[in-house]
Image (cartoon, rainbow, N blue to C red):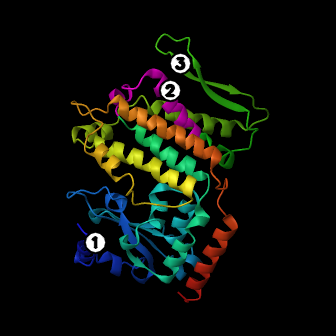
Amino acid sequence: MNIKQIYETVAKSDYDFLREDRHLGNNIILLGLGGSHAYGTNTESSDLDIRGCALNSKRELLTNENFEQFVNEATDTTIYSFNKLISLLINVNPNTIELLGLRPDHYLSVSGIGKELLDNAHMFLSKKAVCSFGGYANQQLRRLDNKVVRLVNQEQREQHILNSINNAYYTFPERYSSFPEDSIKLYIDKSNQEEYDTEIFMDVNLHHYPLRDYKSMWSEMNNIVKDYSKIGKRNKNAIEKNKLGKHMMHLVRLYYMCFDILEKEQIITYREKEHDLLMGIRNGKYLDSNRQPIPEFFEMVGKLEKRLEYDKENTSLPDKPDYNKINEFVMSVNERVVKEET
């Protein structure tokens, strides 16, 4: 489906909700492609995903009426409210930050305020990308079937788990009571258990620390470990439907998009440079005759994880986004809505 066909499709009655829903219509400031069309990894059978942003109305801003997003599952369309989108962008959420980095011809509609948002995309970038993108990538990896994960050796598997925990741990200081950086140390060492060559250990030195906060942190880390031992129905279905290659492709794509953010301070959704690599993964280059990932795929992921660790220490991005600039922008936009100046 080329861009002309996409415009023609969105103009049809199936998408009338974009023009008629009270939350959308003239409130839409950004409308663009999502999914494989946005990444450049689409095939002839790929569904059309539409993503966008709509201003919160004057009524919503001045009352308790809450509108966060509009979803139309039949057309794979998701439109975020402006205030909701901002809250996600602040955390460099992969599913939304990509809306600010589409190819110009992949935007179906951009209003004046939408252009302001795109022009100020850099203010959302920070080291939080390490956690958000790295976390999403590791979630993708954890969703692989148990049989798949065991294709790597046990030590590598422990490293995957530790990387996932570290991505969650990165956000703990913001969400829980503060503690000295060296109070909780996680590392891999030789194991005394028969079924393990190595395993993850922890050194904890906390004093007068809230029990409930510690319980929540421990629960998050425990859930990550448990996830690696689950065989999810979703993953079985993905393997049965030969969609594992697509799943693996998106895992790799997340890393490369994060590298652009950390190394170039740019949001690049369309993966032209890695197109052949990504499509090769999608088409089964790294699957064996039983449709299982071969060890070379996990070796690739290991190298990507090391590059992410290097970027985390060497990026010039700040630890947190420019909250003051973001708040000023949000206030400016919402003030114009209330004054009916949009």
In primary-sequence order, the first of circles 3 and 1 is 1
Element under disc 3? strand
| Residue for point 51% across, 66% down | 85
For the residue carrying disc 3, how many other residues have a C-alpha within 10 Å: few (<14), some (14-19), or many (20+)?
some
Magenta-drawn stretch contains 241: no
Q: Quadrant of the N terminus?
A: bottom left
Q: Circles 2 and 3: CB distance less than 8 Å? A: yes
Q: Is residue 107 left or right of residue 205?
A: left
Tag in front: 1 or 2:
1
Which mark is drawn over residue 158? 2
Residue 48, position in %: x, y?
Answer: 28, 63
Residue underneath mark 1: 3
Can residue 100 be seen in this snapshot?
A: yes
Q: Majority secondary structure of the magenta segment?
A: helix
For the residue carrying disc 2, how many other residues have a C-alpha within 10 Å: few (<14), some (14-19), or many (20+)?
many
Mark 3: amino acid: Thr
